[in-house]
Image (cartoon, coloured by chain):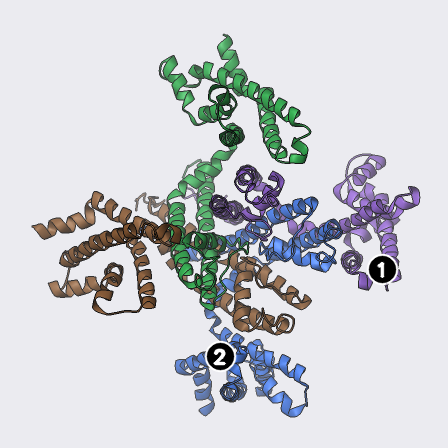
Chain colours: A purple, B green, C blue, D brown
Amino acid sequence: MLKTRVYAFLNENSYFQKFIYTLIILNVFSLIIASYKEIYTPYEIIFDGFEFFSVIVFSIEYILRFWTADLAFEKGSSFSKRIKFSFSTFGLIDLFAILPFYLPFIFPFDLRVLRILRLFRLLRIFKLGRLSKSLQTITSVLKESKSELSITIFVAFILMILSSTLMFYVENDAQPEKFENIGQSLWWSVATLTTVGYGDIYPITNLGKILSSVIALIGIGFVALPTGIISSAFISRMQSEKEKGKGCKCPKCGTEF
Amino acid sequence: MLKTRVYAFLNENSYFQKFIYTLIILNVFSLIIASYKEIYTPYEIIFDGFEFFSVIVFSIEYILRFWTADLAFEKGSSFSKRIKFSFSTFGLIDLFAILPFYLPFIFPFDLRVLRILRLFRLLRIFKLGRLSKSLQTITSVLKESKSELSITIFVAFILMILSSTLMFYVENDAQPEKFENIGQSLWWSVATLTTVGYGDIYPITNLGKILSSVIALIGIGFVALPTGIISSAFISRMQSEKEKGKGCKCPKCGTEF
Amino acid sequence: MLKTRVYAFLNENSYFQKFIYTLIILNVFSLIIASYKEIYTPYEIIFDGFEFFSVIVFSIEYILRFWTADLAFEKGSSFSKRIKFSFSTFGLIDLFAILPFYLPFIFPFDLRVLRILRLFRLLRIFKLGRLSKSLQTITSVLKESKSELSITIFVAFILMILSSTLMFYVENDAQPEKFENIGQSLWWSVATLTTVGYGDIYPITNLGKILSSVIALIGIGFVALPTGIISSAFISRMQSEKEKGKGCKCPKCGTEF
Amino acid sequence: MLKTRVYAFLNENSYFQKFIYTLIILNVFSLIIASYKEIYTPYEIIFDGFEFFSVIVFSIEYILRFWTADLAFEKGSSFSKRIKFSFSTFGLIDLFAILPFYLPFIFPFDLRVLRILRLFRLLRIFKLGRLSKSLQTITSVLKESKSELSITIFVAFILMILSSTLMFYVENDAQPEKFENIGQSLWWSVATLTTVGYGDIYPITNLGKILSSVIALIGIGFVALPTGIISSAFISRMQSEKEKGKGCKCPKCGTEF
């Protein structure tokens, strides 16, 4: 059957997959290079041509994936399977990655909206996610330690709120234009806790410097904690994989199990 | 009995708990937003009204918790149980989170003291700590490795004192206004060891740069050491939890070993 | 036989090896010190003399290694063994570390090419790699976790592309001279994700600061993930080494189990 | 005997030890506070008096430790034991911590030498090292992973030399006053690899930014590698401690060992 062949072509043909992945990467590079006005302006027609070509390819791919969606799922009617595909993560990514091209033909947008719509083309990078088999180890490890990690983030969040509110009251008098409100203070707090330290905002009073030192030192723990959690999850996974292959033997009757 | 019902309502009713947690978070956001003068000034009455409402709610909560305190503890007279509650961590947090509102009615404070008192409202964020069941894993892991962690902090402290004193003598001549005293030098030392590096203070002499390089490289170990300690504690915990569930049994002859 | 003696001298004589390693390190220091014009100009003749001496020694070493190459490999003709050596990693390093000295005698280069050729002398540092027996543990551990590490790098790469493209659109209007194109935006992205934060480029709009905060916080995970992976690989290695040496034996009845 | 009592007093009396530790910490604080000219100048006599008092106490302690040194070691003549003490780590620290006070009475120094001699007082902080029983776990763990850690440092060192030499040739033309020589370039290299990033020196050319990005990304691994090594050593230690307490049983004859 044609549909089965097309489905196999889309999902198993390695030449087609390499072609799509190359096209995605070229799209991303095109987006980056097009931000250089001195390159974009003289070659505008080439960039637009490449964008046109890409949208055609991705549109055909989307239509074919939609058409063969009933082979991708086991249960349900042909219609419900297509709905399922349309609202699956990759279905939505595939759609939103091409939609911005067609929308202006339907609705008359002003330029600012168009500029934001162009950003949706970045979604194409997520189409690479179909490579994701190898991503599974990492994501499953992160999922296992989700509860500890989310508490770490929660504690970090409380810490940031506390330190930035305190810092605001400490530094506001000395630097009213820098520590203007707690929002600016939060920006300082993130830069300090993550140890980025751009240097655009920092305390100048003695009390502020002491507070900032405490926060920076806690920031070390803020790095150490998730690292410890993730390490522990990786090691747990590695050990359970080892034990699977062990072949345990009863010391009394000698039965292997 | 009414008291038992109230006690259950305070500690088990999920709607009441969600309401309190939402109120706490709204209080924190209100504190942050009120720091934006352009937002606070026109809507002052709304912020004051919300503060008034919050204090009423938290006050009622405190009174009820104080009244039902004799159900929270097992031993002791009704009076001693209430004293126990009043001086428990959460009892004190609950009290200090509302006290600043009432104090000015009793004592006539000047504005500067009032401003500091307002900061006590931040304590309300710690009321979220009652969520803490899920925090237990992390805190117990940190407690297990407390002795190693505190020695790391002690070594880091000595390192900071040493490096900042040396740096003061090295850089004071070249930058008398930056490395003005060892206090400023300590500020440089924290920024370097934690790898924050704001860029407001750094050595300019060759000797100072060499010293700073050594400190920055040691700073890497200063991150690695607590991470190793915490990882090890997490893994230890994970393994002992696994072993609990092991109770290895031969499926053929039933021998446990 | 002379050839066997020479081969042993090159590869086993500890005095010769120490001499070569010292010469390599002196070469590197000479290259660094020669970059100080105030030192290089008056002592130019000494630096040139030392360079001449080093090239003579390294050339003799290369010729001898080439001559004795047929003792280094087991199979193949004398000629094929020498070809094998010439195109081995260390063979190429040895060659390219001396070639730039001879090339100008053959081809007339202009000064700019000569300057780049001089940089090839840096390759001499890799000659230290023959020390590498002790490097094996680390490289083998890194190889074991190669697939997870390369996925982390891939995810980090996508993250950098995404964040820098978004940041370009957010900040370009406010700071057209800093966030001039996505290339500059990528430079910001690396500085933030790695938590270096030089402070030459950072967001000034509120939206940009929020985006930057998110990226900086993700940067923490970006450090935690490879650390967890590498820790896990080191521990796996350590445990399998322990188990090798176990061969558990009952001290009373001698039963192995 | 008096000598035995004195020896016990010096090494076991907890009040005396607390007194000495408090005095050391006060000495360090005095050194820090004396760097504030506005505090030191009016109270010079107090600082000098405290220094005089401290030297007296530490001198008496040194004399007593020297006198009772023959009880601290098992073998050798009374004289050889005292020589042993004098050249032990703590013996030397104790001596150099008080020597600078007496030297000016013997030799007439100029002020600059005196200023450096005063720095020797910082050595007093190492007298706290006698607390070191609890430091043993950490130092023994670091010693176990010494070979891997020293290779990491060696690789980092090569990386720094390579990157700073390349950066010097890349940026020297664009910023001759910043990347003036490879020494300055090394300072940039340390700041980048350790992710401190003060922001006083950074590349401005495109090639330099690409090179810097690569170094910053490698810097992440530079943090991950020692962390992984240290974690692994901590876990190894923890596991061997657990196994000691296990009580292994032969499954055949039931002997515990």
Measured from the top left, where is residue C87 in percent x and y? 61, 80
Residue that numbered label 1 is attached to: A47
A54 sits left or right of D222 in the view? right
D6 sits left or right of B123 in the view? left
Where is D99 relative to C228, above or below? Answer: below
Q: Residue furthest top?
A: B1
The residue tagged with tag 1: helix, strand or loop?
A: helix
Q: Residue at x 64, y 83 (%)?
A: C114
Chain identifier of the residue bearing label 1 in the image? A
Residue that numbered label 2 is attached to: C24
Measured from the top left, where is residue D210 in percent x and y? 65, 64
Chain identifier of the residue bearing label 2 in the image? C
**Can residue B14 be seen in the rendering of this structure?**
no
Q: Residues within 10 Å of mark 1 (few under 14, many from 20)?
A: some
Observer-nearest residue: A36 or A47? A36
Q: Residue at x 12, y 48 (%)?
A: D5
Observer-nearest residue: A250 or C34? C34
D94 sits left or right of A158 in the view? left
Measured from the top left, where is residue C188 in percent x and y? 66, 56
Asked whether the beta carbons under mark 1 and mark 2 sit within 8 Å of each other, the answer is no
A70 sits left or right of C146 in the view? right
Return the mark for residue A199.
none
**Mark 1 → mark 2, Cα distance in angstroms:** 50 Å
In the rendered image, which quarter is residue A110 located in? top right
In the rendered image, which quarter is residue D59 located in? bottom left
Q: Residues within 10 Å of mark 2 (few under 14, many from 20)?
A: many
